[in-house]
Image (spheres, rainbow, N blue to C red):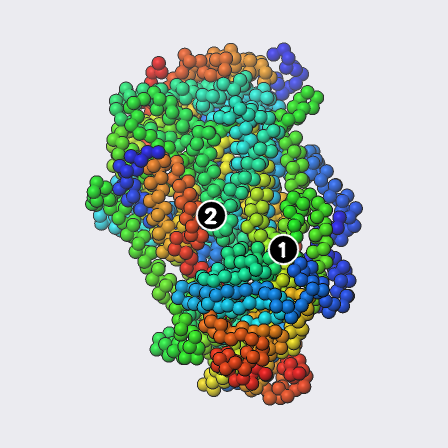
């Protein structure tokens, strides 16, 4: 164990961890939303994210940008960012809705048991990632350098870059907006009602199908934003990028209390930071193991996650 | 109610089979068992044989692969199908079984000098180890509710994989070589050699049959009833005196045991194992197999186990026009999973109970 | 060719046999496998063209590069009695799993790339490798770092693969005190965020970083190092010698990255190989394509000389001294390449996005 | 007629719960539905509110065929149900549960007014305004369910055993409330085991037996029907 | 190859042919019909100064009462008075904040739910909670299993104990179904039973655990008067087999008709205790709970 490593790099490890955690948190929202309402681990959410990472790159490609391009100046950069975000949001949102319509809705129509949903989710996930894998020959795709990471300010001797600030801020803003929407708006209340008692919700005049579609859409949008941030931070994507980060995101969602939006944020940030600390302390190969150990320990003491479930129904 | 609703009065093949006298059933079972043992020679059957057997991979080897997949499916079926515990990291037990064997028998192992056991000697030890792993995993986590258990089991399997990859004792990707094969010789030649996989398949098949008998006995007893009660309403079960924790732990231990058996066979046949095999996707695939086949029903689990192993192996070496279908195997597979589940949400061969439940439920969907 | 039945028309002129490629054609490591297969197939094509008939057939066996898949595929290979020799397996892991089967069937193998040291110590009589093992490549990489880069602070990391970790360990021990810090990562496709590693590299003050692993991870690491502003040189082994690295990282970031390889530059390959390869496959010869080409030719020469059983062909390999396009080949008792013919080259990624020959490194 | 049920059959899986029942509820009426356990009373309610699909027959509401209409759209048309088993949102507070009752309405001041009325009807709910619905006692949940159903200002209110689990004093009260809201213009279809009370408050009533309507008449008629007395009133 | 719990329809029909109302023998360990004595003063269950708080809500406030062996005991009170909570405390679902609960002289606070059940307290739920996909017979057999000792090993190898217990368990379960009057539905999955049948099944399942004390939470909810009459008879018959019954119920006709003694709770406090007649005339009870006194008559 190399404590000096962790102590020396504590600041930077924290900041990069927070940035990674913010991406995980945005990604985790989709799991949490869908789980909260349908009690379904939407395995295919990882591919919703994956398609987002490609949508952005392909859109930037339309502008003639590839991994070898030079970094653009501020004006075009803003344009590319907006266009990239829009593309990812549209593609991820559409993908999420498609999955809901193709893979889940037919099952719901037949009142299928919960495990069936889980397995179609796995099927959808496998299908999408494999099609992407075959189409890209399982090679990586590099991301154009849209934002050049530049130090923005320093705290102590830790420099914080513009990209890190952007990622963390964006995650906070999106979280806040989503939280307001779910807990403050009428439609949001409908979402919670369907989550807690679908039959009663219908009796209150809530359109269940619409709410479910909405939930997938919202999850897709958040995943789209996460995908753009991922592209910028990691710099590379591949057909299995969604699966890989999806496990982190799902872990984060459970860690915070699945079904709980603020829990997803907390879980994501915690996970991102902890992974970095573990990598600093034990070596990078232990980073995922550390997140699972954390998960187990937390669940032992708080069986429904840090903040507990909120959207979800308690089983009467 | 005019209905005399009973599971036993069932249409189709199963209903017919159930109505036969015991000796007819016994003869039929014997007949199909013998057929199963003859599978390695399926290729010699004119016309259909060549369609069935695999091309890119040795047919007996493919059969052996199926046999350990089936074992895994049977074991996971106990955990998921019977006890209703969602385990997303089942491959962890498979790994423990395989590593247990390797540690005791491979010259690469740090304790080889002390043990240097033969395969057969290592089997009981490795199985005890897996059951222990099941209990150790279950003890702290079985109090967790449904889907929390899923992610924790997933986490455990990942931890096992990462530890196997990253610790020098477990040798990671370097792996353990020269794990001995099962014992026995015939005409001076070892029965379990390296070039012929048929004996391994027969061994696997025999183990499967024993497992089927054992699990069936458990299912049709107080144990199976308790599992079912837990799956349906855990708190009510507990209030009715079911020691839920104990039975869940048993389900885990039995599931682990069967998974471990798979691992032990796998190690004995491959003779080389490394951490690459025990990836998460493997667990998920087996789960998909169980549910697709029909969770809670052994015939279904077996079919599921066969399919998840056979389909990719069969696609190997096939090409469609210029494209190698093998490359598309998981894409095809994913689509097939969706299709199967949408068409048969209860699985291909569901348990009678589940089949009925679904039929009823289907008619109750409110207008969407 | 006394024993081969002369009444068998198929074996007229020692024809009617097969040579097999065994290795990854699909899966995430397919690039490396395909390079090798194409070199192998080219050799047989040319041989058949010279003969004017399909004298020796090509048989391809896809192992996906995975140890758990390899045995079944190997058995189906062994079942084909027309196969006299195998080029492969390319990776060390699958070799461990499949070679015992080839050994027991007695089919000679020449691997153009499996470099794990221990493979030659298992007592397999059919095992041969046409390249130096990691014991040669590692010291060479270390020497390059010391002598050519003149680095005084080196960071060493690996992906924990048998290949990557083995290589990194050798490098580490050869560099000794120059190594200021080290780390390990997860394997390909299991990690994408290397920010902790990058941070460690930066704060270690290293000017060179050796990564034992494959191009997939290396590309991401390269990119993230550059993005974080690290200015040092990244060095790696043959597993990183693939244009995939710069595809991921971007050419600018990749420029200057050094990879070593126990092979000579394919463009330096003798004869018309480079052009022939391009003509047939419509792409440049890749890592080990040339060695595979040579390995196939060694077999072909042996068959041509009448060694039309596996035993004879294997015996033939014990005595062969073949001058190919990439190297001269002679095998030791254990199947290793004769130390006299060991070559290690350093390659450097340039603005073309591919690794181009830099210097040949002296292996003491 | 506000509600017309014509020859409706409905099955749960293979269990035929309704064998072609027909009934009507006129504007401004209180209609009671009585019958033994498993007779199909709740099933009838579910068919009207759209929670279960009918296999045959038609349901017309306010002149419109709603047989195939989604449940939530029936709420918009003015059908509101307090379901058997209460159907509380366990994770929402008492106030939020009531708010859900007004989901389809937008007029804030009217909603607040109705909320106030619910609290006045059931003071216990006001006491527990911030308590999670799932932790209320059985009877408290029943009050909440009835209160919530009123929040949508329905044209037709479906009450499935509103007195179930209520203490004797409250039972009296709940029937008073039913009469009161009826007088304020709401049509009520009422399922009750407390047939005595139900029949004496209802304008008309139907008797259901194993999925079939076997009797209908005014409340008073049925109350005095010897067969009904014998089977459902249990007056010894 | 006959399997223990596989009933053919014909077999079930044969069972059903037996008279429905024949009393079910209890395997009762604590009391058998012979030793049953309603008059006995021996205390079975003691609730001793129990307080139970949920955050701010005091659901039970220093409640004390005790049950005697063999009686039918009523627990009544307004909605939210704490009756169900009291049940939950007795069956291990909640743990009292303060106070003690003793069963047959032994404290049961902190014991696990299944331990309490095996110890002799069985219950039904205010909202029916059966195992929906199991048949009625299987539901009851789960209850009967509470006193079985068949282990995983003896089930695996079909040891004699397995056969013995499987057979006796099935017989007893069928008998109980007959006892509560739903033997004709033994082979149906419980989800398909009507509400009233489900309530009966719940009682049969609870009885199968061989309880000394049976707690019924509003068993008559949703019953019409005629059905309530049947239930009243059933409760009496249960008591007659030697089982002590604790009953929560809002239907006064039933409560007054069947109970031997009653405790009344209000706001978590005990406000009265006594025979039905005493309680009915207690002004505090009338004010808090019954309302117009005639209503209860
Ligand atoms: N969810 C369900 N699944 C299957 N069968 C059901 C279901 N709900 C009710 N049934 C069956 O439908 C029939 C009618 O039931 P319903 O609940 O409508 O009766 P009810 O008149 O409301 O009786 P109760 O007074 O007991 O509430 C019964 O035979 C019952 O067994
Ligand atoms: N988990 C909890 N959190 C907060 N309050 C609770 C909780 N559980 C019960 N209560 C409160 O405790 C009080 C007693 O509830 P209990 O369920 O025991 O009432 P009850 O006497 O059974 O009433 P009913 O006749 O309506 O069923 C109620 O006011 C209820 O709201
Ligand atoms: C193709 C090469 C990168 C293979 C590597 N030398 C190994 O032994 O696995
Ligand atoms: Mg009802
Ligand atoms: Mg209660």
Q: Residue furthest front?
A: E41
| B141 in relation to C336, above or below | below
Q: Nearer the viewer, residue D132 or E287?
A: E287
Give x and y (percent) for residue C176. 32, 22
Q: Tell me whether the residue at label 2 lies in contact with that at label 1, contact meaning CB atoms closer than 8 angstroms.
A: no
In the image: residue A35, left or right of residue D48:
left
Q: Chain of mark 1?
A: E
Residue bearing mark 1: E146
Which element is circle 2 on? helix
The residue lying at 65 percent from left, 39 percent from top is B208
Helix, strand or loop for disc 1: helix
**Left or right placement of residue D226 versus residue C299 in this view:** right
Ligand 2 within 8 A of label 2's CB? no
Horizontal side, residue B72 vs residue C293: left or right: right
Residue E288 coordinates in the image, percent (x, y): 48, 79
Expressed as whole percent of the image width and height from the top left, the position of residue D47 reads 56, 72
Residue at mark 2: chain: B
- Marking on residue B323: none
Q: Is residue B318 visible?
A: no
Residue at 52% x, 65% y is E47
Q: Which residue is mark 2?
A: B151
Question: Which residue lies at the image location 63% right of the left edge and 53% below the top edge?
Answer: B225
Circle 2 residues within 10 Å: few <14, some 14–19, many ≥20: many
- Give whichever of D3, E145 is nearer the camera: E145
- The answer to whether residue B28 is above or below residue D60 is above
Quadrant in the picture for the C terminus of chain E: bottom right
- Near mark 1 (Cα within 10 A), the count class, few <14, some 14-19 or many ≥20, is many
Distance of mark 2 from mark 1, alpha carbons?
Answer: 32 Å
Q: Residue at x 42, y 19 (%)?
A: C132
Q: Nearer the viewer, mark 2 or mark 1?
A: 1
């Amino acid at each position: 164990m190399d404590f000096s490593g962790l102590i020396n790099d504590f600041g930077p490890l924290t900041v990069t961890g927070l940035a990674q955690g913010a991406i995980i948190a945005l990604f985790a929202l989709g799991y949490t939303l869908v789980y909260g309402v349908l009690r379904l681990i939407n395995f295919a959410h990882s591919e919703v994210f994956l398609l987002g990472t490609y949508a952005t790159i392909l859109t930037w490609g339309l502008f003639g940008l590839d991994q070898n391009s030079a970094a653009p100046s501020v004006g075009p950069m803003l344009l590319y960012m907006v266009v990239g975000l829009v593309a990812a949001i549209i593609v991820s949102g559409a993908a999420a809705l498609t999955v809901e319509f193709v893979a889940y809705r037919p099952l719901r129509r037949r009142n299928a048991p919960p495990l069936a949903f889980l397995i179609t989710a796995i099927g959808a996930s496998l299908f999408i990632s494999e099609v992407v894998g075959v189409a890209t020959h399982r090679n990586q795709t590099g991301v154009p350098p849209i934002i050049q990471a530049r130090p923005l300010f320093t705290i102590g001797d830790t420099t914080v870059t513009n990209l890190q600030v952007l990622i963390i801020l964006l995650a906070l803003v999106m979280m806040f907006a989503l939280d307001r929407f779910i807990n403050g708006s009428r439609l949001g209340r409908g979402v919670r009602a369907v989550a807690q008692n679908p039959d009663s919700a219908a009796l209150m005049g809530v359109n269940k199908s619409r709410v479910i579609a909405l939930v997938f859409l919202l999850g897709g949008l958040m995943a789209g934003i996460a995908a753009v941030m991922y592209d910028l931070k990691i710099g590379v994507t591949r057909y299995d990028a969604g699966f890989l980060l999806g496990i982190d995101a799902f872990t984060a969602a459970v860690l915070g209390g699945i079904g709980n939006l603020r829990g997803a944020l907390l879980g994501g940030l915690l996970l991102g930071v902890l992974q970095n600390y573990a990598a600093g302390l034990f070596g990078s190969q232990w980073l995922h193991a550390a997140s699972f150990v954390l998960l187990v320990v937390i669940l032992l003491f708080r069986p429904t996650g840090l903040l507990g479930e909120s959207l979800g129904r308690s089983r009467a | 109610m005019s209905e005399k609703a009973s599971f036993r009065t069932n249409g189709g093949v199963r209903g017919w089979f159930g109505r036969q006298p015991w000796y007819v059933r016994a003869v039929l079972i014997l007949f199909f068992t013998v057929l199963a043992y003859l599978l390695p020679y399926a290729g010699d059957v004119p016309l259909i044989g060549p369609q069935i057997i695999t091309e890119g991979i040795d047919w007996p080897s493919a059969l052996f692969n199926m046999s350990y997949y089936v074992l895994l499916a049977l074991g996971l079926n106990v955990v998921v199908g019977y006890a209703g515990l969602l385990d997303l990291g089942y491959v962890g037990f498979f790994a423990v079984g395989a590593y247990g064997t390797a540690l005791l028998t491979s010259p690469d192992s740090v304790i080889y000098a002390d043990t240097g056991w033969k395969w057969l000697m290592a089997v009981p030890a490795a199985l005890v180890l897996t059951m222990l792993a099941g209990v150790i995993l279950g003890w702290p986590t079985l109090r967790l509710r449904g889907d929390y258990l899923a992610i924790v089991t997933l986490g455990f399997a990942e931890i096992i994989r990462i530890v196997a990859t990253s610790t020098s004792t477990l040798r990671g990707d370097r792996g353990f070589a020269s794990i001995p094969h099962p014992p026995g010789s015939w005409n001076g030649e070892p029965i379990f050699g390296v070039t012929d996989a048929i004996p391994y398949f027969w061994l696997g098949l025999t183990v499967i049959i024993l497992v089927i008998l054992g699990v069936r006995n458990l299912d049709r007893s107080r144990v199976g009833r308790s599992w079912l009660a837990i799956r349906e309403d855990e708190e009510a079960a507990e209030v009715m005196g079911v020691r839920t924790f104990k039975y869940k732990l048993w389900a885990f231990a039995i599931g682990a045991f069967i998974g471990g058996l798979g691992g032990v066979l796998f190690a004995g046949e491959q003779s080389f194992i490394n951490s690459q095999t025990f990836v998460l996707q493997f667990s998920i695939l087996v789960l998909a197999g169980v549910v697709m086949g029909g969770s809670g029903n052994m015939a279904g689990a077996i079919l599921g186990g066969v399919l998840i192993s056979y389909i990719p192996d069969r696609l190997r070496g096939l090409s469609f026009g210029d494209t190698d279908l093998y490359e598309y195997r998981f894409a095809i597979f994913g689509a097939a999973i969706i299709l199967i589940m949408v068409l048969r949400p209860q699985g291909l061969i569901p348990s009678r109970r589940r089949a009925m439940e679904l039929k009823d439920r289907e008619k109750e969907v409110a207008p969407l | 060719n006394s024993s081969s039945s002369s009444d068998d028309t198929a074996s007229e002129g020692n024809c009617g046999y097969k040579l097999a490629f065994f290795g990854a054609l699909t899966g995430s490591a397919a690039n490396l496998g395909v390079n090798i297969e194409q070199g192998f197939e080219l050799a047989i094509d040319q041989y058949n063209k010279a003969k004017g008939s399909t004298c020796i057939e090509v048989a391809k066996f896809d192992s996906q590069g995975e140890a758990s898949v390899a045995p079944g595929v190997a058995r189906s290979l062994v079942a084909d009695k027309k196969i006299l020799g195998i080029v492969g397996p390319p990776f060390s892991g699958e070799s461990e799993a499949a070679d015992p089967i080839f050994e027991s069937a007695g089919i000679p193998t020449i691997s153009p790339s499996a470099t794990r040291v221990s493979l030659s110590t298992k007592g397999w009589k059919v095992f041969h490798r046409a390249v130096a093992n990691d014991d040669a490549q590692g010291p060479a990489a270390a020497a390059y770092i010391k002598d050519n880069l003149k680095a005084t602070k080196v960071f060493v990391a690996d992906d924990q693969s048998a290949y990557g970790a083995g290589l990194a360990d050798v490098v580490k021990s050869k560099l000794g005190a120059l190594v200021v810090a080290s780390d390990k990562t997860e394997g390909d496709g299991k990690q994408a965020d290397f920010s902790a590693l990058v941070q460690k590299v930066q704060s270690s003050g290293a000017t060179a970083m050796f990564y034992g692993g494959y191009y997939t991870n290396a590309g991401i690491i390269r990119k993230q190092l550059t993005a974080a502003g690290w200015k040092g040189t990244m060095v790696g082994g043959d597993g990183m010698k693939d244009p995939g690295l710069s595809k991921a990282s971007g050419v600018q970031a990749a420029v200057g990255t050094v990879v070593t390889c126990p092979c000579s530059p394919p463009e330096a390959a003798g004869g018309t190989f480079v052009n022939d390869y391009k003509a047939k496959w419509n792409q440049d010869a890749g890592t080990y394509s040339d060695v595979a080409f040579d390995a196939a030719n060694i077999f072909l020469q042996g068959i041509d000389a009448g060694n039309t059983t596996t035993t004879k062909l294997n015996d033939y390999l014990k005595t062969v001294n073949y001058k190919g396009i990439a190297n001269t080949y002679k095998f030791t008792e254990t199947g290793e390449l004769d130390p006299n013919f060991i070559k290690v080259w350093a390659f450097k990624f340039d603005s073309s996005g591919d690794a181009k020959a830099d210097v040949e490194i002296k292996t003491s | 007629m506000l509600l017309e049920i014509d020859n409706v059959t409905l099955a749960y899986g293979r269990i035929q719960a309704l064998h072609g029942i027909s009934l009507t509820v006129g504007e401004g009426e209180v209609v009671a539905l009585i019958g033994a356990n498993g007779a199909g009373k709740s099933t009838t309610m579910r068919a009207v509110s759209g929670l279960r699909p009918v296999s045959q027959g038609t349901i017309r509401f306010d002149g419109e065929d709603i047989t195939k209409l989604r449940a939530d759209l029936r709420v918009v048309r003015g059908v509101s149900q307090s379901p058997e088993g209460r159907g509380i949102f366990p994770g929402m507070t008492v106030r939020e549960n009531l708010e859900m009752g007004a989901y389809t309405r937008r007029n804030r001041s009217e909603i607040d007014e109705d909320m106030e009325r619910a609290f006045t009807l059931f003071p216990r709910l006001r006491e527990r305004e911030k308590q999670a619905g799932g932790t209320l006692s059985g009877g408290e949940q029943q009050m909440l369910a009835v209160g919530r159903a009123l929040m949508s200002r329905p044209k037709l209110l479906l009450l499935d055993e509103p007195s179930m689990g209520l203490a004797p004093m409250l039972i009296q009260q709940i029937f008073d409330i039913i009469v009161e809201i009826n007088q304020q213009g709401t049509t009520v279809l009422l399922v009750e085991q407390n047939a005595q009370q139900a029949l004496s408050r209802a304008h008309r009533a139907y008797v259901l037996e194993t999925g079939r309507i076997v009797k209908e008449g005014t409340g008073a008629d049925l109350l005095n029907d010897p067969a009904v007395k014998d089977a459902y009133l249990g007056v010894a | 190859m006959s399997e223990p719990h596989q009933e053919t329809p014909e077999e079930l029909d044969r069972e059903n042919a037996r008279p429905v109302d024949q009393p079910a023998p209890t395997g009762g360990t604590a009391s058998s019909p012979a030793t049953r004595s309603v008059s006995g003063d021996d205390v079975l269950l003691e609730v001793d100064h129990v307080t139970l708080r949920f955050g701010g809500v005091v659901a039970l406030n220093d409640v004390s009462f005790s049950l005697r062996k063999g009686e039918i005991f009523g627990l009544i009170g307004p909605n939210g008075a704490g009756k169900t909570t009291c049940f939950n405390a007795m069956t291990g679902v909640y743990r009292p904040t303060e106070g003690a609960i003793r069963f047959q002289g032994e404290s049961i606070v902190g014991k696990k739910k299944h331990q309490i059940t095996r110890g002799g307290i069985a219950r039904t739920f205010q909202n029916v909670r059966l195992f929906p996909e199991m048949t009625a017979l299987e539901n009851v057999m789960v209850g009967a299993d509470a006193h079985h000792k068949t282990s995983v090993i003896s089930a695996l190898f079909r040891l004699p104990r397995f056969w013995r217990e499987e057979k006796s368990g099935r017989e007893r379960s069928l008998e109980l179904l007959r006892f509560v009057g739903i033997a004709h539905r033994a082979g149906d999955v419980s989800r398909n039973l009507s509400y009233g049948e489900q309530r009966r099944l719940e009682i049969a399942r609870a009885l199968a655990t061989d309880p000394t004390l049976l707690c019924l939470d509003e068993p008559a909810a949703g019953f019409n008067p005629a059905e309530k009459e049947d239930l009243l008879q059933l409760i009496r018959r249960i008591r007659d087999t030697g089982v002590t019954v604790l009953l929560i119920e809002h239907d006064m006709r039933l409560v007054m008709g069947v109970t031997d003694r009653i405790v009344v709770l209000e706001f978590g406090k005990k406000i009265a205790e006594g025979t039905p007649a005493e309680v009915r005339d207690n002004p505090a009870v009338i004010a808090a709970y019954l309302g117009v006194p005639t209503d209860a008559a």
